[in-house]
Amino acid sequence: MKAKTLILFSFLVTLFCFSATIGLANVWIDENFDGTGPSIPPIWVQGNGAGAAVAPADATLDIYVQGGALGGKTITGSPLVENGSKVTTRYFDGTASYRMTSSQGISVSSNISNPANGAYVILQFAVNVAPIPAAGNVAIFRYEWDTNSTAPPSPDYSFYVKLVSNGTKVDIIAGEDLKNITPLEANIGSLNATADWKFITMVMQNNAPPATYTQVNLPSGSLSQLEGVAFYCSSETQGHFVPMIDTTNKTFKDWSFSVSSGTVYLDTLYWESGMDNTAYIDATQINIRKFNYSGSPSSVNDWELY
C-alpha cells in the first residue's frame, strides 16, 4: 500500500510539474510604438495580463498572463530597462518606431512572470539601420536560456541576431556562441539601403519530444520543431536553426538589444510564450505576425536628413 501511495504521489508531483510548464502562457510584449493612450510617450504601457479586458486598454506589456498563483505581472520596473526614444519620422508599420543610437538599447531580466512556461516562445521585431554606418558591428540582440538550472554555467545558451556593416550594407547574422564555443551562425539577410526594413522572427521550442503549434499566421498554419531556435528573416523559409540539448530544467534568463554604432530603428516588437497550448489560453490574444510580414504600404518613411 505504501509503495502504491508513493508511486501515486510521485506521479501527481510529476504531472503537476509538467502541467506547470506547459499550462502557463504569456503575451509579454506587443509594442508597435503607435499608442495614443494616456502615458507620455504612449509606449511600454504596463498591463494587468487580462487579455481582452487588459487594463489599461492601451497596454503593450503583460497583455495576457495565465497561470493563477504562479502568474504575476512583472515586465516593467527592474525587468525592463530601455533608453531609446519613440520617433514618428521612420517606421515599419503604423506611425512610429523606436530609435536607438550608440550605447542605447533594451533589456529584460529573468524577473518576469512564468519564465519557464510553454513549449514555444516566439519573438518578432522589425529592424532598420539608417544611415549605413562604417564597417563593423552595429547592434546585437541576445536571448539567453538556462537548460539545467541545477548545474553551472548559467545561462547555458546565448542565441543572437547581430547586425554587421561592411560600409555599404548591413548583414543580419543569426547564431549561438555560448554552448557553441565556435559560433554556430549564418547570414539570414541584409539591409541593403537606408529604406530597407527586415522582419525578424525567432522561434524557440524547448519541449522534448518535438511540439506542434497551430496558428493561422505560422508558415503553412502550423509549426513542428525540434528543441532549439529557428531564425527567419522576412520569409516563411527558415534561415537558420540552432539545436538545444540537455534541456532538463529549462528557463528564460534574459534578453537584450544593444547598439554599438550607428542608428537603429526597431518596430513591431512582439514576445509570447506558452501560447501554443490551446487548452490553457485564449487564442484571440495571439498576435503573431506572418513571418514574411512587410508592414504597411507606407512603411518606408524617410523624412530624416543626414
Image: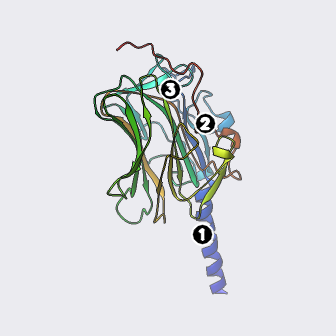
CB-based contact (under 8 Å), mark 3 and mark 1 = no
Q: Would residue 93 appear left or right of 175 to someone viewing this image?
A: right
Residue 169 screen position, x and y as percent? 37, 30
Badge 3: how crowded within 10 Å, few (<14), some, or many (20+)? many
Q: Quadrant of the C terminus?
A: top left
Q: Earlier in the sequence, mark 2 or mark 1?
A: 1
Report the number of numbered marks: 3
Q: Which is closer to the viewer, label 2 or label 1?
A: 2
Q: Which residue is mark 1?
A: 14
Q: Secondary structure at mark 2?
A: loop
Q: CA distance from mark 2 to mark 1?
A: 35 Å
Q: Using the image, determine if residue 53 lies above or below residue 229.
A: above
CB-based contact (under 8 Å), mark 2 and mark 1 = no
Residue 223 screen position, x and y as percent? 63, 51
Res 140 → quadrant: top left
Q: Secondary structure at mark 3?
A: loop
Q: CA distance from mark 3 to mark 1?
A: 41 Å
**Residue type (three-letter) at the residue carrying disc 2:** Arg
Look at the image and tell me whether residue 109 can be seen: no
CB-based contact (under 8 Å), mark 2 and mark 3 = no
Q: Which is closer to the viewer, label 2 or label 3?
A: 2
Q: Which residue is mark 2?
A: 289
Q: Using the image, determine if residue 35 lies above or below residue 231.
A: above
Q: Would residue 108 appear left or right of 165 to someone viewing this image?
A: right
Q: Which residue is mark 3?
A: 43
Q: Earlier in the sequence, mark 2 or mark 3?
A: 3
Q: CA distance from mark 2 to mark 3?
A: 19 Å
Badge 2: how crowded within 10 Å, few (<14), some, or many (20+)? some
Residue 201 screen position, x and y as percent? 52, 41
Residue 214 screen position, x and y as percent? 68, 49
Q: Earlier in the sequence, mark 3 or mark 1?
A: 1
Residue at the image point whose x is 48% and y is 28% from the top:
197
